[in-house]
Image (tube, rainbow, N blue to C red):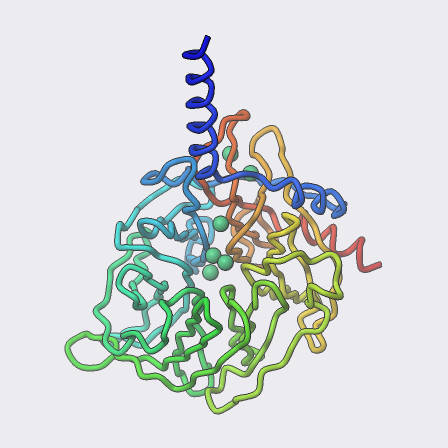
Amino acid sequence: MKRISYLIIIAVIFTLFVCGKCQRISEGSVKHAKQIKPTVTACFETEPMKNVSTQDDAADDPAIWINENKPDESLIIGTDKKTGLAVYNLQGKELHFYKHGKMNNVDVRYNFPYMGKNIDIVACSNRTDKTINIYKINSNGSLEQIETKGFEPVMKENVYGFCLGKDTENNKFYAFANSKKGEFVQWEFKESKNKIIEAKVVRKLQFNGKLEGMVADDISKTIFVGEEDACIWHTAINPKDQSINMIKSSNVETNKKIKADIEGLAIYRGNKNNNYLLASSQGNYSYAVFEFKPPYKYICSFRIVDSKQTDGAEETDGIEVTSVALNSQFKQGILVVQDGFNYDDKQLKSQNFKIVDWGKIQNIIDSESK
Ligand code: CA
Ligand code: CA
Ligand code: CA
Ligand code: CA
Ligand code: CA
Ligand code: CA
């Protein structure tokens, strides 16, 4: 009898130990999520992250590269913050994987002058080497790393959130990174000697709380910065600007539809008046939509839920969106989001990204803004 009780105690301790490490769906978040009524479903999902276990918080942030000549062959590039960078097609099939370190956030820019040509680049914050990695994007989806100089640590804490920006008038390229301690740094980078990309720091800012999600809009020359448990800030891309402004409607204390953490940010530029700023609201498994003009009025929120083909998205980190007509299925573009709990037929798999037809989201925005 005594032996049985020992066994039970050991079993309980073991279960507690294992589950302590588990990624769990939070009941609080589920309760909050139920208050967000509009829902959509994903069309596709990417293959689960291969180099990690089902318990790992691994997939983090996506980017989209538009193949100008063959939009249907555009790419989704996603970070695995434990091991590297993955490249997928629009149906979620993995085409390439680069085991280059703990890649946190990733972004794309077009027409970077390099070796006498204009190339498209993808760049990401690499927490293994405490730097920024830059790659040339080939049209077959493969990535070629370019040597860089000048992205050495300039913050007290390691690089975390990251995005790219471009001053289109002066053809200047910028990289932005932040840290968990509220530090924000901006580099300008260009090709220098011997095929190397060289970066120099052009601005540093200090925010109060933990930062991560960022997105820069080259047209309005604005960069948006998410302070995870507070709100979204914006400042000019121009490094001379030292002012930071709060988007009041994104404040988690006053906007009950947004629950910390504020994570991924993305900008949808439609062809009419449909321009939006999107934010992942991690604490209620939803996405907040704002007008894309000051004062960035809040419009609505929606969730991505289970369908027969794909499960919904919960506890999303990074997001990315495009308005480009990619094919007959995605005439108004796509939204790509990270999924914290990827299930296939009720079985937990490692994390991945969901691919949603923007048309479905536009329908929600149209009916919610009536
Ligand atoms: Ca996560
Ligand atoms: Ca991104
Ligand atoms: Ca985060
Ligand atoms: Ca993240
Ligand atoms: Ca899911
Ligand atoms: Ca799934």
Residue at (49% x, 45% y) in the render: 353
Residue at (46% x, 71% y) in the render: 181
316 in relation to 202, above or below: above
**Residue placed farthest to the left in the image?**
194
**Residue placed farthest to the right in the image?**
370
Image location (x, y in percent) of residue 359: 66, 50
Image location (x, y in percent) of residue 34: 73, 42
Image location (x, y in percent) of residue 68: 43, 60
Q: Quadrant of the C terminus?
A: bottom right
322 with respect to 74 (left or right): right
Determine the image quadrant of residue 157: bottom left
**Residue placed farthest to the bottom in the image?**
240
264 in relation to 236, above or below: above
Image location (x, y in percent) of residue 65: 43, 58
Determine the image quadrant of residue 311: top right
Observer-nearest residue: 233 or 107?
233
122 with respect to 236 (left or right): left
198 with respect to 106 (left or right): left
